[in-house]
Structure formats: structure tokens, C-alpha cells
Amino acid sequence: MDILHLTPKDDLQKILDSLTGPTTIYLAEGKYIDKLWIKCDNVKIIGANRETTVITWDDFARKAHSDGGEYNTFRTYTVCVTGNGCSLENLTVVNSNQDARKVGQCVALSVNAPLFYAKNINLRSEQDTLFTSPFPDDLVIRYSGLTDDPAYYDGFIPKEQLYMEGNSVQIYDNCRIYGTVDFIFGCAEAYFNECEIISLHDEREHGFIAAPAHSLKQTDGYTFINCKLTDGGAAEGSVYLARPWRDFGKCQFINCTLGKHINPALFDRWNDTYRNHTARFAYGNLTCENPIDPVVWCSQLTKEGIKAAEGKAASAMTMWNEYAETHLK
């Protein structure tokens, strides 16, 4: 494996584009003002310090793009990962826009790969902080130019960032993720282990942590285990754990600690939809600062259900460790 030591003076995107094989990149402390696309497989990026090694950019959904359209959600990322088996450690990724109500969605990290691992990282934005591939099927059709209908976008997202066949397994260990609305969203099988999920203030006076969009054929969605859900300025009772971005979105919160900002109902059905009849949401063994009164359409996990979820999270971690032992050394 190649090893590189870089500083903010280096052209990080140029170096990433030149990679041809497994590489570990050590980033010195400092601010890297870059919009990055990691295309090569098996790239490990390790920051010198989680708080002071910062990759930042400022694109937003309503910004005019050079192709004549708007950036839309999915071109606003600060860091986009399409290489398989990549990982980020000990750093911060920021989308620096501060008012999603005015500028729209602002993605910090977009992961579009079959396997991804993050440890000890901070992800900071407001609306749509973290996208976890794959895309919902209807958006693949809309954004890939597969139709002549002028109401659809015409292939403005690169295929590598849009269409990924098969499942994506993503693991986030001891990370801090900041946001306001739908700030963890997508269709991955994703495990959030001992993470701190921080809900910021939003003048719209409501927030949603997760917006899963899994298809019915997917048996595993988002699993939050031993996470701390904290108030970063959100009003009491103003934040829901999740709402389904598509009909069969799946998520579960297990052994998590909930602050007063979490709404007693826990989950929302997504505006005036009927996704309360199809969403697959569950919780188990929560520690709550305020009493909860969960919606009737979510499920409370049994001890057996909790054990099974913990087992799948452990299996995903084992899979990553085995992959890293083979490909990242």
C-alpha cells in the first residue's frame, strides 16, 4: 500500500485522481478548502486531529450550475466517495452553508460505494448532511436521462455518483453528525455505533434525523446502536428520529439516549403521505429525558430483536475488518 503525507497546500483532488491502487493518505492539521471526489478503491484518509483537520466546501441546492441547472441536492457534496472499500478517520467534513431554509440542501458527505467505513469523524451541515447510497430507483430514472420526458433531469449527475447496483454496507463508528432536516438519508444498510447525533436549531421549528428510503426487498436499513441524540439548539419536542423518504424506508434505534428535543411520538410519516402504513421503523431500550408516546405504526423491539440487530452490526464490523486486513495493508 502506498502512503502519502499531505498538507492544506497540496492539491488534494489532483492527488486523488492520480491514485491507481490502495493508498493511505495522512492529512496534517489545517483547513482543506476542497470539493473532493474519491474514485479509487481502497483509499484510507486519516486526519491528524478530528477537530482541526477540516475538509470544507460551500455548494448548495439552489446554486446555479455551469450546465444551466441548479446544483440540486446530490451535486452539493463536500466529499463524494465512489471508490469501494474506502475509509475516513479522525477528521471533519463540512458543508459550510448555514441557512438551508434559504439555500436548500447542503450535503457534507455522499457515499456511493458497496463498502465504506468511518471512524472518529465529524460531519457538519444542516439539511441532508450525509447521503448513503444507493439512490431510490425512481431517482435513478429521473437523473440518468433514461426518459425523454422534459419534466425529468437529463443525466446531470455522473453515473458513478448515481447508479450503484446491489447493496451498500456502511459503518460509522464514534462519529458526530450534525444537522436539522433529513440529515442522514438514503438506502444503505448503515450502522451507526456509539455516534453522537446533534440536532441544530432550525427556524422552521421542526427537524428529522433520518430519512431512509429503502426498497421493500432490502431486509436491513439504518441501525443506530448506543448512540447519543443531543440538542444542538433544537427546541424541545421539535425533532423526530426519522421519517420515510420512500414508502418502505427502514430504521431502528437501539440502546440510544434521547434528549428533550426528541418528539414523544418518535417518528413522522412524511407530510401528508400514507407511508405510516409501509415504513419499517422500530426502537428498543431507549433512555429518554422526557416521556415518550410512540406512534402506533412503529414497532418496539423484543430482547430477541435487539440481540439480532446487535449481531448484524457486529457481523458488518467483522466484514469490514476482514476486508481491511486483505485490501488495506
Image (cartoon, rainbow, N blue to C red):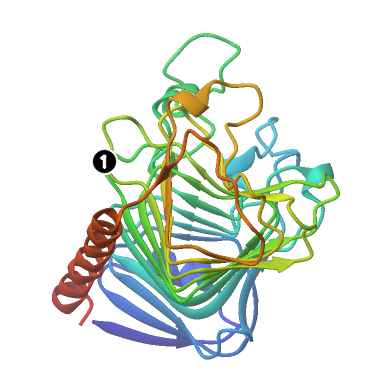
Q: Quadrant of residue 309?
A: bottom left
Q: Does 273 appear above or below 74?
A: above
Answer with left or right where residue 246 lies relative to residue 129: left
Q: Residue at x 31, y 29 (%)?
A: 216
Q: Which amino acid lies under the numbered mark 1 shown in the image of this protein?
A: Thr
Q: Residue at x 66, y 40 (%)?
A: 71
Picture mark count: 1
Front position in the image: 179 or 44? 179
Q: Does 10 appear above or below 244?
A: below
Q: Position of residue 249 (x, y in %)?
A: 43, 36
Q: Give the class, few, some or many, for how many residues have Cα within 10 Å of label 1's Cα (few <14, many ≥20).
A: few
Front position in the image: 117 or 252? 252
Answer with left or right where residue 223 lies relative to residue 296: left
Q: Residue at x 63, y 57 (%)?
A: 291
Q: Position of residue 224 (x, y in %)?
A: 43, 60
Q: Position of residue 239 (x, y in %)?
A: 68, 51
Q: Give the labeled residue for mark 1.
A: 219
Q: Position of residue 129 (x, y in %)?
A: 60, 55
Q: Does 140 appear above or below 300?
A: above
Residue sticking out furthest to the top: 149
